[in-house]
Image: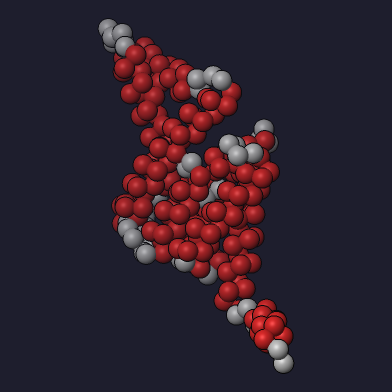
């Protein structure tokens, strides 16, 4: 047998090596959960209804993947999701799934896999969610050629006006104070959002044979459902 024939037969034998069950499950779960996240993002972006439900569901599939298969597989799932959405939605709209949903899925999956305290995963998750929200507002403002932060600013101004009317305060807010209240609204939204993600994962993941840490004692009455 010549040297070329030996190399050819060796390359053929390499291709015949079967995948282990663990590797096959990693590939299948990464593909399916990344595709599920992509579909949820597309539905959130284009459908006029169900936005709150889709937002709650977005980070959970990839967080589940990371709990089940490890950090490396979780990062691969996020990369697959981003590449798929970049093809389907374009190089700007597709990667926006990272801010904050992709980054949140990585952080929450990692902290839940490490069994870290809810206070840590919740507080860092709020910071990631707030920064991701601001990045998304900036990118979308560029895409539509309009300052979308004005919408948040108007909500902050309306909240201040309601407070002034309710308590009859002799107070006229300036722009800096309105911006601070607008940022406070964003942070409050993320506090509630990340806590809801923890609660949903605590209720749902045990039924998929994946577990997250127990809630702290202060939140046990709030998170009342038992993960049977």
- Residue at far front of view: 2
Q: Residue at x 67, y 86 (%)?
A: 3
Residue 99 lies left or right of residue 159; in this view the side is right
Question: Compared to 14, does 146 lie above or below?
Answer: above
User: How has the structure been colored for display?
Assistant: secondary structure
Residue nearest the observer in this picture, 19 or 45:
19
Residue 226 seen: no
Residue 79 seen: yes
Residue nearest the observer in this picture, 125 or 141:
141
Estimate the x, y position of residue 228 in percent, counting from the top left: 51, 67
Residue 103 lies left or right of residue 34; in this view the side is left
Question: Compared to 142, does 76 lie above or below?
Answer: below
Q: What is the total number of numbered labels drawn onto the structure image?
A: 0
Question: Compared to 61, does 40 lie above or below?
Answer: above
Residue 159 lies left or right of residue 86; in this view the side is left
Residue nearest the observer in this picture, 59 or 94:
94
Estimate the x, y position of residue 149 in percent, counting from the top left: 46, 23
Estimate the x, y position of residue 163 in percent, counting from the top left: 35, 17
- Residue 95 appears in which quarter of the rendering? top right
Considering the image in quadrants, where does the N terminus appear?
bottom right
- Residue 106 appears in which quarter of the rendering? bottom left
Q: Residue at x 61, y 67 (%)?
A: 27
Q: Residue at x 33, y 23 (%)?
A: 180
Q: Residue at x 50, y 20 (%)?
A: 147
Estimate the x, y position of residue 90 in percent, counting from the top left: 64, 39
Residue nearest the observer in this picture, 160 or 88:
88
- Residue at far left of view: 170
């Amino acid at each position: 047998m010549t040297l070329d024939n030996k190399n050819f037969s060796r390359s053929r034998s390499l291709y015949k090596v079967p995948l282990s069950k663990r590797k096959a499950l990693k590939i299948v779960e990464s593909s399916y959960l990344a595709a599920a996240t992509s579909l949820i993002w597309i539905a959130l972006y284009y459908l006029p209804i169900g936005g709150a439900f889709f937002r709650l569901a977005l980070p959970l599939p990839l967080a589940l993947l990371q709990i089940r298969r490890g950090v490396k597989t979780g990062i691969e799932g996020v990369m697959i999701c981003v590449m798929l959405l970049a093809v389907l939605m374009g190089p700007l709209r597709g990667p926006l799934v990272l801010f904050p949903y992709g980054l949140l899925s990585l952080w929450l999956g990692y902290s839940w896999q490490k069994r870290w305290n809810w206070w840590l995963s919740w507080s860092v998750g709020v910071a990631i969610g707030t920064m991701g929200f601001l990045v998304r507002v900036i990118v979308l403002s560029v895409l539509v050629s309009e300052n979308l932060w004005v919408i948040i600013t108007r909500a902050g101004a309306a909240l201040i006006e309601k407070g002034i009317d309710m308590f009859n305060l002799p107070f006229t807010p300036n722009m800096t104070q309105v911006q601070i209240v607008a940022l406070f609204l964003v942070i409050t939204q993320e506090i509630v959002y990340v806590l809801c993600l923890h609660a949903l994962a605590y209720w749902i993941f045990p039924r998929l044979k994946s577990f997250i840490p127990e809630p702290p004692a202060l939140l046990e009455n709030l998170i009342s459902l038992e993960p049977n």
